[in-house]
Structure formats: structure tokens, C-alpha cells
Image (tube, rainbow, N blue to C red):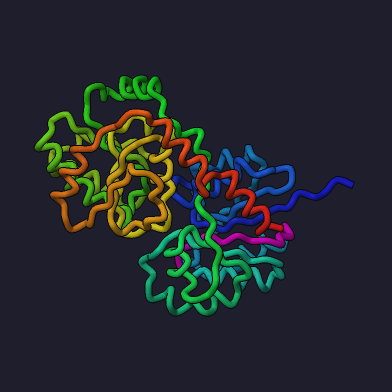
Amino acid sequence: MEKKVKRILHIVGTMNMGGQETFIMNLYRKIDRSKIQFDFVVHSKEVQFYEKEIKELGGKIYKIDSMSKNIFLHMKNLYRIIKENNYHIIHRHTNSSIIWFDLLVAKIAKVRRIIVHSHSSSSKYRIINKIFQGMMNMLTDVRLACSQEAGEWLYGKKKFEIIPNGIDFEKYKFDLEKRKLLRNKMKLEGKFVIGHIGRFSYEKNQAFLIDVFRKIKNKNADAKLVLTGDGEEKDAIQKKAKEYGINEDIHFLGNVNNVFELINVFDVFVFPSIYEGLPLTLLEVQANGLNAVISSQISNEVILTDLIQKIPLDIIDEWISTIMQRRRGENLEKYNDIMLKSKFNIDYVICRMKKIYK
């Protein structure tokens, strides 16, 4: 008798271009979908960036309003989805304990295993997180986190398991021909290209990056900045760039599906986040052999090579001088080999997750 496919219900804010979404999709693409399938609940009625791919891979996507819009309708719709489709495992991705409402719904719906997954070491819901932490922990069967800091932030003193953000590193190997092709297409030949990948949000701190780039541009006329992603702060960042008179030197690319190719274009990567969980992007750029200048707020867990330079956010002059000195080196393939042997290799992470989904 053929064994039934196990369907896991992932509950996540959106399935657009963010770190946790990238991790979920890396896992989904590589897991044995003849045995395990993923379905998704998102809190937006809009078309999601990964929606088409999810459906092509055999997944379903349910769209309901967020708790902030109408908590009772949210809970009612979530309960209906769980019961009508007979889900036995839910995997709730979050950075705040406010999601205990979803866990309560899952308990009432008699879900057998409730997995909570922390993807950040802080959030704007700091007080709320403390208030609901106990309730969330009581309703959770399996506690996961992308890093030590992310786990301590969400669960406090409760035990949790660290599941590294897994990546298919082979895709990120440096490609000189792709670099030449894309730089030519983007009219960046002979330019000093600073790259950044991330959702436009407060914690990603693109406003600081614009300030840094403005001063670099005054020192190096060939400097260009490439930004990918979307988000609530994008309009404000574009406005700031225009006010500084540097908007013509910045490429706002929006959400892109070829990040693994685009990284080849950059000469240096800049990541000035105020807080993070364990950013996938910094693992990806190391696999590409790309130097990165990052904020000292980011966990040392992400540093696997000599390509990363950490700087406090309050020393802007050091950011400027360090970025301007960074260039691509030689023998970049060795960095991909280092990452392939690390715990962040997607194949290793899949083995861990298969045991959790049993």
C-alpha cells in the first residue's frame, strides 16, 4: 500500500523575498516531496513572490487576514483551514510570542505537533513578547531557532534546538562570465559596485546605508549602489536618495529571483542591520567569495570565513574607509568549498528537519 504524503502547514506572515521565506523555500525545493509536502497560511490577500513556485511544487497557499486586522476572524479562518484539511503538524515561523493565538487554535483543532521557529533576535514587539512568552512556550511542542540569540529572544530560558538556515551553496559559486554579462547589462563596467540585499524595513537600516553611500560617492565618483528587495521603508529610502542627489547612482531592483547570479556583480557587500536572527544573505555572499562589511549587532555564528568585517553602527567613518578598501580577491572557489562543508549546507538541514517532521 502506497504511503500517504505528509503535509506540513507552515504559518508565516508572507511568502515574499525575506530571510525566513528564503530558508523555507530552500528547504521545500530540496526535501523529498513524494513523502513530505508543504502548504502555507499567509496574512495577506496579495499575490506572493513565491506563490507560483509553491503551486508548481505541489503546495497550497491559503490567504487570511492578520491578527491585527481582526483577531477573531483570523482564528476562525485558521481553525477552518486546519480542520478541513486534517493537518497534524503545523510549523509557525515568527519573531514574537504574540503568535500564541495561532498555537491555541492549533491545540483546539487537535494538531498533534506544534513547531515554533524563531527567525530573529529582536523585534518591535519587545514588551508583548515578554507578556505572552509563557503562554506560547506552554502551547509549543518543538522549539526551533535559527541562532542562539534568536532562541533566547523568543523562548527565554526554555530549551530549544538550533536549526541553521540551510542554503544550496553550489548555486552561489563565483561566476566570472556571469559577472561580466550582468555588469555590462546593468551598465556597471569599470564601476565600484556596493551591494545590499534585504527587505526595506527599520531593522535592515537602509537609511544608514544611504548616508554611508553619499559620503563614499563624494570620494569615489565611480561608486554605485545596488539595492534589492521591497518593503514599507522603500519609499522613504528612495526619497532620501533623491534629496541627497544620489538617486541616479543607485539601482533599486525590487524583488529579484536571481540573487545567486546578481551577487557576482558586487565588489563589496554591506549589511548594516540593527538586529538580525541569522541572515542567510551573509552565508550566500561568503559562498560567492564576496567581502562583506556588517554591523557589530549581527551574531558571530554567521562568520565562517575571513571575508566578514564587523563595525559598530556609531563609527560611520570606519564604515566608509573599510568599504572603500574592500575588493574581490583571488581563488574565490575555496570559499564555496568552506561553505559546502559547513552546518549551513541545505542537505544537512534537511536531515535534521525530516526527523522533526516525523
Left or right placement of residue 215 versus residue 265 in this view: left
Q: In the image, residue 145 lies at what x, y percent? A: 51, 61
Between 255 and 319, the residue placed more toward the observer is 319
Between 78 and 175, the residue placed more toward the observer is 175
Q: In the image, residue 95 lies at what x, y percent? A: 45, 63
Between 349 and 69, the residue placed more toward the observer is 349
Which residue extends farthest right? Answer: 1
Quick check: is 96 in the magenta stretch?
yes
Q: Is residue 173 visible?
A: yes
State the count of labels: 0
Tell me the quarter of the image containing the C terminus. Answer: bottom right
Q: In the image, residue 313 lies at what x, y percent? A: 22, 56
Left or right placement of residue 35 versus residue 49 in this view: right
Magenta region, residue range? 84-97
Q: Residue at x 43, y 41 (%)?
A: 284
Q: Is residue 205 above or below residue 105?
A: above
Q: Is residue 273 above or below residue 57?
A: below
Q: In the image, residue 47 lies at what x, y percent? A: 51, 44
Between 53 and 291, the residue placed more toward the observer is 291
Q: Is residue 241 above or below residue 158?
A: above
Which residue extends farthest left? Answer: 218
Q: Is residue 208 above or below residue 184?
A: below
Q: Residue at x 30, y 31 (%)?
A: 329
Q: Residue at x 58, y 55 (%)?
A: 41
Q: Is residue 47 visible?
A: no
Q: Residue at x 68, y 56 (%)?
A: 355
Quick check: is 22 in the magenta stretch?
no
Q: Quadrant of residue 126?
A: bottom left
Left or right placement of residue 312 versus residue 232 in this view: left
